[in-house]
Image (cartoon, grey):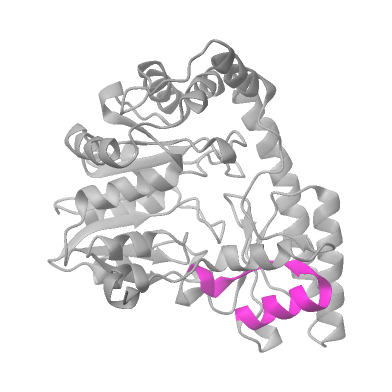
Amino acid sequence: MNYDSLLAPAAKAMRPSGIRKFFDLAADMPHCISLGVGEPDFKTPWSIRDAGIRSLEQGRTRYTANAGLMELRVEITRYLARRFELEYEPKQVLVTVGGSEAIDMAIRALVAPGDEVIIPEPCFVCYEPITQLTGGVPVHIATRAEDDFRLTPEQLRAAITPRTKLLILPYPNNPTGGVMSQKDLEAIAEVLRGTDIMVLSDEIYAELTYGLDRHVSIASLPGMKERTIVVNGFSKTYAMTGWRLGYAVGPEPVIKIMTKIHQSCIMSAPTTSQYAAVVALRQCDEAIEMMRDEYNRRRRLVVKALNEMGLDCFEPRGAFYVFPSIQRSGLTSEEFCERLLNEKAVAIIPGEAFGACGEGYARISYAYSVDHLETALRRIREFLRENGWAKD
């Protein structure tokens, strides 16, 4: 069999995940300190785990409705109204296998071959390959450190063409930690009003923002709800990565088509996870605050240490990542990360893994214990000193 000719060109052209590459390398090094994976180190709160256990003991192991348990969809609408002033009905909610499936369903529901999808970078790694698998055309916008990695209205306006179908808005941002304020979002919304361009707002880190201003969804702005699909989930907010549960909310005609695709490809999200998520939404606001406060403490520690040792880092205001410049080393981001891994057994992720404009940077996750972070930071400082790159 000639598998090369049988495999779909778009699938063959997909880049392997730069995140997983370094994760796999670190897994084979017993003394490695990994700051590479964006996964909370907290246990899922007990009340959530208990709800999952009870659902199993009660024999709730059958498929749910394709769109998700009605009880869960109702709780999602209440949560969004309570926390972000977003008003939706249960029929506008689709429960998915993680936020990643929600992103996949949204792009597949909207993008036809030749349609252009605007993707601000650096960003999460899945937007481009999913767009390409649908036959869409990714249009990259390189955000800049001097703008705190925010998308500007001037950049957006310059990228729009008659073939633009979708803008992906990935804020709070992975990998940079950048956020968009209400004022920033208003400027973006003004560019989009009067067009037929949809927005996929990936808000998986919406609860993890730091400072006085809480996250604002672009869907809450006048005239934007009708053109926005909001993606969120339970992985980051409730430390539920392995439960694989997310959701999308948006205009009913779009959610209806997304649900039809989901019905054919997935059937329904995990039943046990859905019952557990109902309790998360009802009972765990305090757990959110506790985890956010601890991430904030770690954030301040890591940013201060990196700047002091010479890896210039702007202050991230969201998610649980920092994105320091490694340009003083003269190495590419992949060379820097490979040498750090081999010489000091610390795993971080090359910025280039998140788009070409991420070159010259690296992503460091602070979703780890303070002891873990301090050990890794000490090793990074030694690495810089030994190579003559540390700040004097």
> Does residue 191 appear left or right of residue 282 in this picture?
left
Q: Residue furthest top?
A: 58
Residue stretch rendered in magenta on the structure: 333-354
Residue 339 is covered by the magenta coloring? yes
Quadrant in which the N terminus appears: bottom left
Looking at the picture, does residue 183 appear above or below residue 12? above
Could you say which is closer to the camera, residue 54 or residue 35?
Answer: 54
Query: Looking at the picture, how far across and down is residue 168, in whole percent?
Result: 34, 56
Could you say which is closer to the camera, residue 113 or residue 63?
Answer: 63
Query: Looking at the picture, how far across and down is residue 62, in whole percent?
Result: 42, 20
Query: Looking at the picture, how far across and down is residue 93, in whole percent?
Result: 32, 29
Q: Residue at x 14, y 51 (%)?
A: 194
Could you say which is closer to the camera, residue 195 or residue 365?
Answer: 365
- Could you tell me what secondary structure mostly forms the magenta stretch? helix
Q: Residue at x 58, y 64 (%)?
A: 19
> Does residue 165 appear left or right of residue 350 in this picture?
left
